[in-house]
Amino acid sequence: MAFKIASSPHVSTSLHTNTVMKRVALCLIPGIAVQSYYFGLGTLIQLFLAVSVAYLAEAAVMKLRHKNIKATLSDNSALVTASLLAVAIPPLAPWWLIVIGTLFAIVIVKQLYGGLGNNVFNPAMAAYVLLLISFPVQMTSWVAPQTIALNHADLVSSLQSIFELNAQYSAEYFRTGVDGITMATPLDTLKTDLSMGLTTTESLAKPIFSGMTTQSWFWVNMAYLAGGLIMLKLKVIRWHISGAIIASVFVCASFGFLISPDTFVSPLMHLFSGGTMLAAFFIATDPVTAATSPRGRLIFGAMIGVLIYLIRTFGGYPDAVAFAVLLANMCAPFIDYYVRPRSYGHRTGN
Amino acid sequence: MLTILEQLDKGSLWQSPGGIHPPQLKTLSNQSAISRLPLAKRFVVPVPLVGEQATLTVTVGDKVLKGQILTEGAGFTYLPVHAPTSGQIIAIKQHATNHPSSLPTLSCIIEADGQDTWCDLTPNSLNQLSKPQILDKIKQAGIAGMGGAAFPSHVKLNPASEIDLVIINGIECEPYITSDDRLMRDHSHEIMSGVGVINHLLNPQRIIIAIEDNKPEAAQAMQDALNRSDLPKGVVRVTVIPTKYPSGGEKQLIQIITGKEVPSGAIPAQLGIVVHNVGTAYAIQEAIYQGKPLIERVVTLTGEHIGQPGNYWLPIGTTVADALQSVKFIESAEQKVIVGGPMMGYALAELDVPILKGTNCLLVPSQNEIAPDVDEKACIRCGECAVACPALLLPQQLFWHAKAEEYDKAASFNLKDCIECGCCSYVCPSDIPLVEYYRVAKSALKIEAEEKRQAEQAKIRFETRLQRLEDEKNAREAKAKEAAAKRQANMKSSDKDAVAAAMARIAAKKAQVTTAPSTASSTETATQTSQAVVDPKKAAVNAAIERAKAKKAAQASAARNDTLDSTSESVIVDDKQAKIAAAVARAKAKKAAQINQTDMVPTEVEPSTDIIDDKKARVAAAVANAKAKKITKENQTDETALAPQPTAEIESTTDIEASTDPIDDKKARVAAAVAKAKAKKLAQANQTDVTILAPHPTTDIESTTDLEATTDLIDDKKARVAVAVAKAKAKKLAQANQADEADTTIESIANDSITAQHTETPPTLKHEIASGSDTRLIINDDSAAYLTPEQIKKAKVAAAVAKAKAKKLAKSAEQEEH
């Protein structure tokens, strides 16, 4: 008789990579829902586009690499990457933007580095930065939020806008937008205003900060926070990175705000505006490109938080999540090398 | 320590990092008391120490009793082996053992007689024995750690340093296993007696009996036994700790109980702590109070594929197959039989392996109880493994380096502190068999360390050898120098002349090569009078050749030859050589000869080789005349390759050198003759044979020229024969035949020479040889001169015979061949 030989342990948990990834994607749903509510169905179209392109691209690369296409696609990592990119870009951005971004993320940033587990940079953020640098106009034009999603851009007009079926598109098109409803984000406006010598109070008095706009961004962030908390509860992520980002952004912003409330934005504005929560729970927590030890992750998260604040306040871009994450990605191996936990029996000074 | 003692008494516990909570599945086997299985027919008792520390006390065919010692030996960690039952030893051979590798180990195969008769046992009580006697009794009972590692217990009970704390390990944190659980429930009193023995031996400040909170019955039983026992109350304590895998690990348990960490690479005794398993305590008690050696243990037989899961007393040496057979083992496809628990156990490759002292469980799971075999996926560096690691390692980094085979880097992440508990693999979402990677890396590091050690040793050996060789070389050189100096002193007279002559020849040769007009300069260099002694001979030979083939040139050189006879001036020699060169050119072997000669000159340094080369050049010319230019050229190159070797060795007189000359000279003739006979190819083959044969005699410096001359004759004759055969138009056949003859005729030299009677030599040839002999006579080369005419004659004879009997020979050759 032949007996099966295997190395111990002979049992394992049921939480597999594909489940983890699937849960991350599912936890994005509250955020996506709120985003769609305020900014229209464009986000969903972008999401559909991104996921399709991501799967196609990954399948093509797997074919070229002579690897098991099904096994790779079923790990759901492409799904998460595509989703993150889709929610990060403006909802009514033209279709080629998301296609270029997704292809770059999957083919270049992820697969050319060896596929899942081997990429140095967060694929979604690397793609986001590529798009932001290459197509700054399209990447900073957000639709003005509306209470009732169906009110401003219905499915058909969103599709028309995204696929540029409307012949009158141009760079200006996104400024005026579909019926003149696109606009800069609150952070963008604030930054521009501050650079023009306005105080935060003056700037915040602008219509963009009253009512819908600030409120919409606040709720979007709250939704991502909720999704993040679910992930924590499901042990899909550990608290270290998210906690460190939120804490460091809060500390930095409070510090600046206390020194000069007129020229620095309030900590709450920092935490619940832009992509802070999305970054803290969904982007920076990508384990592949983060530091691995608990202490390392605290440093990694704190670094992202500080960078977000610094770039937002002193840098040239209104939001800084993507840059902060990529810079921290670069440091992750360095952090891992120097921040090692003390192993059992290696007590210092013993 | 005081505060720690207080905390121990309070029952405070510390947190051990990492760990997991796998499903326990202990109820499968802990529902009934420990029972016995029918005695097996055959037992396999490994005696691995035999040959190292021990010898066998039994032989094949011996009858043994239950508990009888099978080995005796000495050594710190030596443990005797006992017969598990009464019966007969039917074999002592290599048998697969209970190990992941199933590697064969020397084992006694015992056929049970079914009586199970005990040998004589000597029960004692503690106060009858001294501590060394108790330790010896424990050692003689063969007690090893029952928790799995099977480390000899007497060693741990006799530590070098003071022991403050003894932990009795009843944790049993692995899922499925309940052998300690049941032992504590069913034999708590006996365990407590064993604890008493340990207390007596080590006299620690505290003894903690640690039990996980998933075994409340066991903890209660132990508490009751403790209350009933006469052990000092303040010393022994039952502590219940939270269930977590791997709390039962020695280091983890120490951390939980005391908050201390065993330093990396150290043993707990250095902290004043010793950990013993409850099973060991039971066995110690059996050994002291019953006198029984450790020949059976409780084994949990569990898993969904065991019909009657539970705990059983199994004699050590019972085969896994027998044990499983008696509990209704259900075998399925791809069945795993795991020794130990699901976390750290290993799967067996075959079942005919024995239960050992450390075998606490046999797990026979169904497919849905264990993880399916899935392909490992990419590590996403989620870090869950690091969270689960009880040794606070970074398993993902270890994996990364282990997979890349960067074992030194893996080692820098404290790979050696990995206890292989399997927590990392358990939590890995990518199904990576992390522990397997670490095992591979660990063995690689072990091998590397061993190789490094060996290389270090080899290096030392090598350096010593180099030094020795160097010393020897120096000694040799010194000796050679001494010998050379001696020779120099001895050579003062004739030998020195020879050397000088050789030097002159080199100079002459150089002059000859450059062109004839350079004679003047070469004359200046050559001043030694004795040079003439050697050179004339050479020159004469050359001259002879020239005369034969190119009459004009030959005449000129002959005149000079005469002058040479009277004088022994080197000037003349060089002059003559220059002329010879001219003659060679004239001899119409312009291109071939020239190329040959120039090729040869740069390579030849040895004085003695010059003679041959020079001659060879002539031969080339002759052969060229014979219109076999290309062929002979090839021949000559062959000759050059062969000739220098023997001549280089010749350090003695010119006589021997001279004797080589005739051989080659003759060969050249032969070549010419053959060529003329239009059997070009044949001759070529023949000549090569000749060259191969000829040089050999010259290597024997002591041998006479007569002998050499005879070989010449043979070759010469052969050549004639070749010609004849060729003429007989049996070219191909004859060629083969000749080759045969060349080998065979050597033995029949005498006969051949006798047959040589009638000769018809061309006048030119005669003349040439005569002049050659003349010169030789002048050189005082008596033997050579004496031989040459004979040679000639014989050669002629051979030719005649060959011509006369060409056809017959060819025919006979043909016959011989077939």
Image: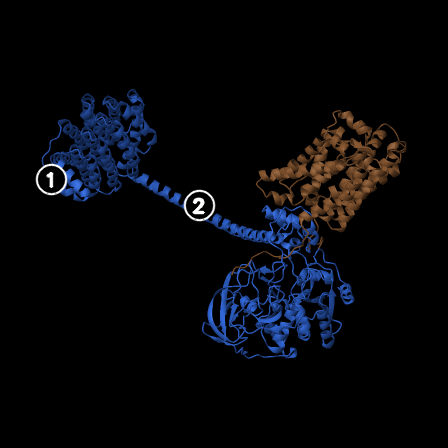
Question: In the rendering, at what x and y percent does residue A51 appear?
Answer: 69, 39
Question: In the rendering, at what x and y percent does residue B816 appear?
Answer: 18, 43
Residue located farthest toward the left when viewing the structure as drawn: B758
> CA–CA distance between discs 2 and 1?
61 Å
Q: Quadrant of the C terminus of chain B?
A: top left
Q: Quadrant of residue A160?
A: top right
Which chain is home to disc 2? B
Q: Quadrant of the N terminus of chain B?
A: bottom right
Tint of chain A:
brown
**Chain shaded blue:** B
The image's mark for residue B344 is: none
* In the rendered image, residues at marks 2 and 1 fall on the same chain: yes
- Amino acid marked by disc 2: Glu
Left or right: B644 as drawn, with respect to B378: left
Q: Is residue A125 visible?
A: yes
Residue B651 higher or lower than A294, as above or below: above
Q: Is residue B785 visible?
A: no
Q: Which residue is mark 2?
A: B470
Q: Which residue is mark 1?
A: B755
Element carrying mark 1: helix
How many numbered marks have been drawn onto this rendered protein structure?
2
